[in-house]
Amino acid sequence: MLTYRIDGDGPPLLLLNGGLMSMAAWQPLVDALPSHRIVRCDFRGQLLTPGIASSWEEHVSDVVELLDALHVEQAHVAGVSFGAEVAMLLAALHPSLVSRLTVISATDYTTPAMRIDADEGRALARTDPAELLRRVARKTRSRAFLAAQPGDYIEQRAKQAALLPPAFWAGAEAILSLLLTLDLRPHLAKITAPTMVIGGEDDEVFPPEHSRAIAAAIPNARLEMVAGRGHGLLFEEAARVIALLAEV
């Protein structure tokens, strides 16, 4: 079963990680939402959960198993990037489990350019993890954010590669591989949960037209676009994301 953590008490809120992320990265949001029972987990292949999953459906099944083990009959599910893709498929395949859905920095499908990036990323996960983290930092952080950081910010991110075990990079390779076949467009109209889509106007990983397409395809979805932010808006605009999540 997925490694997880539970914080707080109140309506269940399940947070699903981005690809190169651990559940620890959600801590600022967890601290700001004490009125929720927050469940966090690492997907298979991430830092705290061993093994890999070979399909999107396997990741969904892992989440279903976790909710069942925790006796959570229904939850507000919020996911970022990779986790948002899993969250949308979960809401489409298991609608009774999702009371509300929040989709952050996501795409409805991967374009040829996205697939090239994912293919290069999975090769770097195997051969040069430090360079992968450099590329991720450059592409996910907004210009305004990077301009405000110390000059060695990207190199400090690259140094983190040496601190992570080889199993993490094998898992990262498997997660990036799934982006080569991602197409959620046939599933989006099946989502019945009230849905909010949050996207960055400057997202270079999953450009803003994909957030708009998701919101248009999911019945009655609400769209929130954040100006001046890119793929990393969850962290750069944490206060705004927290405020939106707290509306529930």
Image (cartoon, rainbow, N blue to C red):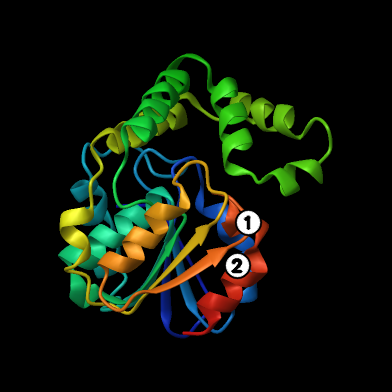
Which of the two residues, 158 or 40, is positioned nearer the viewer here?
A: 158
CA–CA distance in space, label 2 to label 1: 9 Å
**In the image, residue 168 above or below residue 212:** above
Indicate which disc residue 182 carries.
none
- Give the left or right position of residue 28, taking residue 48 as reference: right
- Give the left or right position of residue 154, taking residue 185 as reference: right
Which of the two residues, 154 or 171, is positioned nearer the viewer here?
A: 154
x, y percent for residue 163: 62, 29
Residue 7 can be seen, yes or no:
yes
Residue 171 can be seen, yes or no:
no
**In the image, residue 2 above or below residue 195:** above
Determine which residue is flagged by label 1: 235
Q: Nearer the viewer, mark 2 or mark 1?
A: 1
| Type of amino acid at the residue the image marks with label 1 | Phe
The 10 Å Cα crowd at callout 1, few under 14, some 14 to 19, many 20 or more, is: some
The 10 Å Cα crowd at callout 2, few under 14, some 14 to 19, many 20 or more, is: some
Residue 130 location, quadrant: top right
Label whose residue precedes the other's in the sequence (2 or 1): 2
x, y percent for residue 236: 66, 56
Determine which residue is flagged by label 2: 29
- Give the left or right position of residue 240, taking residue 156 as reference: left
Residue depicted at 63% across the width and 34% down the height: 138
Residue depicted at 38% across the width and 31% down the height: 113
x, y percent for residue 85: 33, 53
| Type of amino acid at the residue the image marks with label 2 | Leu
Which of the two residues, 248 or 165, is positioned nearer the viewer here?
A: 248
> Looking at the image, how many numbered discs can be counted on the residues?
2
Q: Residue furthest front?
A: 209
**In the image, residue 100 above or below residue 44:** below
- Give the left or right position of residue 35, taking residue 218 as reference: right
